[in-house]
Amino acid sequence: MKSGPNIYNASQKRRQSDEFNQLRARLQKLNKQFDPLLGHAYGRKRTEAGKNQAYRDRSGQAFWTEITGDPDFYVKLIRLMGDEPQRRREEFAAEWDALSNRLAMEFVSDFCFGDGRIDWEKLTQFVSAEEPPKLPRRSISRDES
Protein backbone atom coordinates (compact mmCIF):
# COMPACT_ATOMS: atom_id res chain seq x y z
CA MET A 1 0.00 0.00 0.00
CA LYS A 2 1.18 3.49 -0.89
CA SER A 3 -0.30 6.81 0.16
CA GLY A 4 -1.19 8.10 -3.31
CA PRO A 5 -1.22 6.96 -6.93
CA ASN A 6 1.62 9.08 -8.35
CA ILE A 7 4.60 7.92 -6.34
CA TYR A 8 6.43 5.71 -8.84
CA ASN A 9 8.81 6.36 -11.66
CA ALA A 10 9.30 3.83 -14.48
CA SER A 11 12.26 2.03 -12.89
CA GLN A 12 10.41 1.70 -9.57
CA LYS A 13 7.41 0.22 -11.40
CA ARG A 14 9.67 -2.32 -13.13
CA ARG A 15 11.26 -3.25 -9.80
CA GLN A 16 7.84 -3.66 -8.18
CA SER A 17 6.75 -5.94 -11.03
CA ASP A 18 9.99 -7.93 -10.77
CA GLU A 19 9.46 -8.43 -7.04
CA PHE A 20 5.87 -9.55 -7.55
CA ASN A 21 6.97 -11.94 -10.32
CA GLN A 22 9.64 -13.46 -8.06
CA LEU A 23 7.09 -13.95 -5.30
CA ARG A 24 4.61 -15.45 -7.78
CA ALA A 25 7.24 -17.98 -8.92
CA ARG A 26 7.96 -19.05 -5.33
CA LEU A 27 4.28 -19.40 -4.50
CA GLN A 28 3.52 -21.39 -7.66
CA LYS A 29 6.06 -23.97 -6.50
CA LEU A 30 3.93 -24.32 -3.37
CA ASN A 31 0.71 -24.52 -5.43
CA LYS A 32 -0.47 -21.23 -3.94
CA GLN A 33 -2.49 -18.61 -5.79
CA PHE A 34 -1.18 -15.08 -5.96
CA ASP A 35 -3.03 -11.94 -7.04
CA PRO A 36 -0.76 -8.94 -6.37
CA LEU A 37 -2.50 -5.66 -5.68
CA LEU A 38 -0.84 -2.30 -5.15
CA GLY A 39 -3.23 -0.12 -3.17
CA HIS A 40 -3.30 3.64 -2.76
CA ALA A 41 -5.16 5.31 0.11
CA TYR A 42 -6.54 8.00 -2.21
CA GLY A 43 -6.96 8.70 -5.90
CA ARG A 44 -8.80 7.14 -8.83
CA LYS A 45 -6.17 4.90 -10.38
CA ARG A 46 -7.41 1.51 -11.50
CA THR A 47 -5.24 -0.67 -13.74
CA GLU A 48 -5.03 -4.36 -14.45
CA ALA A 49 -1.94 -6.55 -14.55
CA GLY A 50 -0.55 -6.90 -18.04
CA LYS A 51 2.56 -7.26 -20.13
CA ASN A 52 4.38 -4.33 -18.49
CA GLN A 53 2.94 -4.59 -15.01
CA ALA A 54 2.67 -7.76 -12.91
CA TYR A 55 0.12 -6.38 -10.47
CA ARG A 56 -3.23 -4.67 -10.30
CA ASP A 57 -3.47 -1.07 -9.09
CA ARG A 58 -6.40 0.30 -7.08
CA SER A 59 -6.79 3.72 -5.51
CA GLY A 60 -9.27 5.45 -3.25
CA GLN A 61 -12.77 4.01 -3.14
CA ALA A 62 -11.89 1.09 -5.46
CA PHE A 63 -9.02 0.02 -3.18
CA TRP A 64 -10.94 0.33 0.08
CA THR A 65 -13.94 -1.49 -1.41
CA GLU A 66 -11.75 -4.33 -2.62
CA ILE A 67 -10.09 -4.95 0.72
CA THR A 68 -13.16 -4.37 2.94
CA GLY A 69 -16.13 -5.20 0.70
CA ASP A 70 -17.73 -1.92 1.80
CA PRO A 71 -18.10 0.71 -0.98
CA ASP A 72 -18.50 3.46 1.66
CA PHE A 73 -15.46 2.48 3.75
CA TYR A 74 -13.28 5.26 2.31
CA VAL A 75 -15.76 7.85 3.61
CA LYS A 76 -16.21 6.02 6.92
CA LEU A 77 -12.44 6.27 7.47
CA ILE A 78 -12.47 10.05 7.30
CA ARG A 79 -15.52 10.22 9.55
CA LEU A 80 -13.78 7.97 12.07
CA MET A 81 -10.78 10.29 12.17
CA GLY A 82 -13.10 13.16 13.04
CA ASP A 83 -11.15 16.12 14.35
CA GLU A 84 -8.06 14.06 15.23
CA PRO A 85 -5.91 15.69 12.51
CA GLN A 86 -6.82 19.15 13.81
CA ARG A 87 -6.07 18.14 17.41
CA ARG A 88 -2.63 16.86 16.39
CA ARG A 89 -1.82 19.91 14.28
CA GLU A 90 -0.17 21.73 17.17
CA GLU A 91 1.87 18.64 18.05
CA PHE A 92 3.42 18.62 14.58
CA ALA A 93 3.63 22.39 14.03
CA ALA A 94 7.16 22.70 15.43
CA GLU A 95 8.42 19.83 13.23
CA TRP A 96 6.69 21.32 10.17
CA ASP A 97 8.20 24.74 10.85
CA ALA A 98 11.67 23.27 11.38
CA LEU A 99 11.48 21.32 8.12
CA SER A 100 10.22 24.35 6.23
CA ASN A 101 13.07 26.46 7.64
CA ARG A 102 15.68 23.79 6.87
CA LEU A 103 14.49 23.44 3.27
CA ALA A 104 14.50 27.22 2.82
CA MET A 105 18.05 27.45 4.24
CA GLU A 106 19.24 24.68 1.93
CA PHE A 107 17.66 26.38 -1.08
CA VAL A 108 19.31 29.69 -0.20
CA SER A 109 22.63 27.96 0.40
CA ASP A 110 22.49 25.99 -2.85
CA PHE A 111 20.75 28.34 -5.27
CA CYS A 112 21.09 31.95 -4.09
CA PHE A 113 23.74 34.61 -4.28
CA GLY A 114 25.10 36.11 -1.04
CA ASP A 115 22.55 38.93 -1.21
CA GLY A 116 19.62 36.46 -1.33
CA ARG A 117 18.80 36.74 -5.05
CA ILE A 118 18.16 33.41 -6.79
CA ASP A 119 20.97 32.17 -9.03
CA TRP A 120 18.62 31.14 -11.84
CA GLU A 121 21.42 29.75 -13.98
CA LYS A 122 22.57 27.35 -11.25
CA LEU A 123 18.98 26.35 -10.43
CA THR A 124 18.22 25.73 -14.11
CA GLN A 125 21.37 23.64 -14.48
CA PHE A 126 20.42 21.62 -11.41
CA VAL A 127 16.96 20.74 -12.69
CA SER A 128 17.76 20.43 -16.42
CA ALA A 129 21.42 19.76 -17.21
CA GLU A 130 22.49 16.26 -18.23
CA GLU A 131 25.22 16.61 -15.60
CA PRO A 132 23.75 18.75 -12.82
CA PRO A 133 26.08 20.61 -10.48
CA LYS A 134 27.00 18.67 -7.36
CA LEU A 135 25.39 19.91 -4.18
CA PRO A 136 26.80 19.33 -0.71
CA ARG A 137 25.54 16.17 0.99
CA ARG A 138 23.69 16.95 4.15
CA SER A 139 22.70 14.93 7.15
CA ILE A 140 18.95 14.81 7.66
CA SER A 141 19.32 14.53 11.40
CA ARG A 142 16.69 16.40 13.37
CA ASP A 143 19.23 17.11 16.09
CA GLU A 144 21.43 19.49 14.10
CA SER A 145 22.10 22.72 15.96
Image: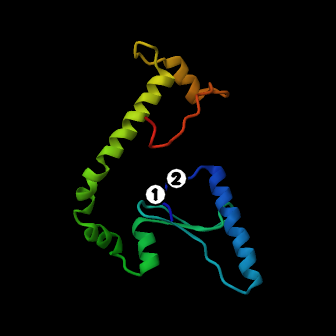
Residue topped by disc 1? 4
Res 80 visible: yes
Q: Amino acid at mark 2?
A: Ile
Name the kind of residue labelled 1 in the image: Gly
* Marks 1 and 2 in Cβ contact (< 8 Å): yes
Residue 97 lies, in percent from the top left, at 33, 40
- Describe the element under mark 2 as helix, strand or loop: loop
Q: Residue furthest right?
A: 29
Real-space Cα distance between discs 1 and 2?
A: 7 Å
Q: Secondary structure at mark 1?
A: loop
Quarter-of-image position of residue 34 = bottom right
As drawn, 27 above or below 99: below
Residue plotted at (67% across, 63% down): 17
Give the residue number, with chain letter if any, for mark 2: 7
Q: Can the viewer see residue 51? A: no
Q: Residue furthest bottom?
A: 31
Q: Residues within 10 Å of mark 2 (few under 14, many from 20)?
A: few
